[in-house]
Image (cartoon, helix red, strand yellow):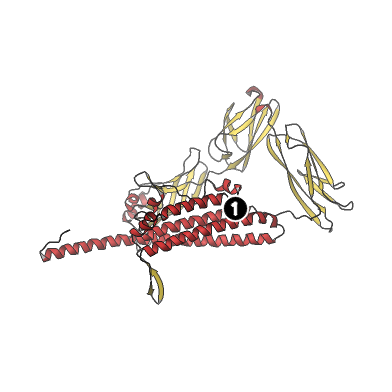
Amino acid sequence: MALPKEPRQKMINIMYLVLTAILALNVSAEVIEAFRTVKTSLESSSSNIKSSNDVLYKSLSDKLKEPESAKQAAEWQPLAEKAKQYSADLDTYIEGLKTELKKYSGARMVEKDGKQVEEFKLDDLQASTRLMEKEKKGDELKAKLEEYKAKMLAIHPEIKAAFESTFPVNTEPVKSQEGGTKEFTVGYFHMTPAIAALTMLSKFQNNVKNAENQIVTFCHSKIGAVEVHMDQVGILVGQSSNYLMPGQELVVKAGVGAYSSASKGSLTINGVTSQLVNGQTEYKTTVSGGGAHTIQITGTFTGEDGKPVPINQKVEYVVGTPGGAAVMLDKMNVFYIGVDNPITISSGTGWDKTTVSMAGGTISGSNSNRTVRVTGGTAASITVSADGKSNKFDFRIKRIPDPVFKVGDGKIRMPSVSFKAQDFCRAELENFDFDTKYTVTSATVYFSGANFANVQTAAINSNSLAPVKALMARCGPGSVISFDNVKVTGPDGSRTIDGKSIALY
């Protein structure tokens, strides 16, 4: 704007501009401090996860040297090393982006308190746009994150099955406040202050460390204790069939591949103990109950060195279902505590010849459409008797997963104006098919950061935020609100769930 010629008025206008700049600088400083805090927290979390990963890698290496676990370790330890290498490569790449970003923001080494420290322009809005958009580093980062996810899931089919839907690293479009979405680079880096862009990059590094930890933990869990056998002997198991119908006889023969007539030993098959004769024994049973079944074989025999050699093996078989009888879960393969679990039962012989009973819960309804309710435990079963033959169907019992605590849109960053307009919090079940809800009954709330010289503590005793409205009114950009010790109640009773920290801008 043009300045007036009159000196006094010119001075007043200049002072007004300076005051406006100072006020803007104060708000910016609060936002910058909030991002600096989040960035430090993410880097600390990544460091903790790295320490956990180092322990897992050390344990995997040790298991390679232990005879009882060497075989499984030889399969899974190299796969964990692949996950380690993929993660290290991506972490190094992102760290390089952070270095470039700081250079674009005028990074330089200065001396403070006798030490050399790095300084750069934390609130530079151009650096991230130039590096990530104009130089296409954002698109490159997105491609590398997607490639990383594909490579990690391709390490082993079991890893893909376990983590494909929950993998911590993703490049989904960023939701905008207007209700739409923004593509990856624009959503994370367009006109973003340098410290905020660095925080976003630290977030992706933390996601990579978390993904690495999950995959390596999975590999580690696949290495269990192995039964130790002498090289020249081993257990031999045969069965008459691995698919039978109810009422048919299953014959299991078990023995050792090398034995001495002077040696003594015994096997326990499905809980029945019998002595080895000529190095073998036989077990017979009449099968029932549709579905997959397992028979456990345990015991010992005397090895050539005179020491007892343990035996632990399974025989698996499937019992077919007569008359077309079947039980199918309409929603999942488990029963959930405290809610109606709808199921469908079919019977090829007609309902006048079919009866249904349940153990571990209650079942209501008639004919095909039934409803199951369970109140606890870990397993339940439904028995369908059709055409004079009974079939037992086993199910697992699980607790409803923890709901997620949310305020507003549920994000960890929120405009201060939006936060102060919130009247309620909630506990929301995500990706759960049943129509059930949880209610927040209490939580401890901490207010810190901008506008709070000291941490302020308050509490709520319902979904309503009314008890903390006065403190919410004081919040501004740079304030941090943490909800902790969140208690909720639902159809299966009360529980404590994870809280959430919200940084305002």
- Residue under the image location 33 percent in, 57 percent down: 477
| Residue 407 x, y percent position in the rendering | 40, 48
> The N terminus lies in which quarter of the figure?
bottom left
| Residue 475 x, y percent position in the rendering | 33, 56
- Residue under the image location 19 percent in, 62 percent down: 16
Foreground of the two, 492 or 263 = 263
| Disc 1: CA contacts within 10 A as few (<14), some (14-19) or many (>=20) | some
- Residue under the image location 77 percent in, 54 percent down: 229
| Residue 416 x, y percent position in the rendering | 33, 53
Foreground of the two, 495 or 311 = 311
**Which amino acid does the dot numbered 1 rest on?**
Phe
* Residue 456 visible from this viewpoint: no
In the current view of this chain or complex, which residue is farthest to the left?
6
Left or right of 211 in this view: 353? right
| Residue 231 x, y percent position in the rendering | 79, 55
* Residue 22 visible from this viewpoint: yes
The image quarter in which residue 54 lies? bottom right
Number of numbered labels in the structure image: 1
In the current view of this chain or complex, which residue is farthest to the bottom?
114
> The C terminus lies in which quarter of the figure?
bottom left
* Tag 1 residue: 218
The image quarter in which residue 72 lies? bottom right
The image quarter in which residue 60 lies? bottom right
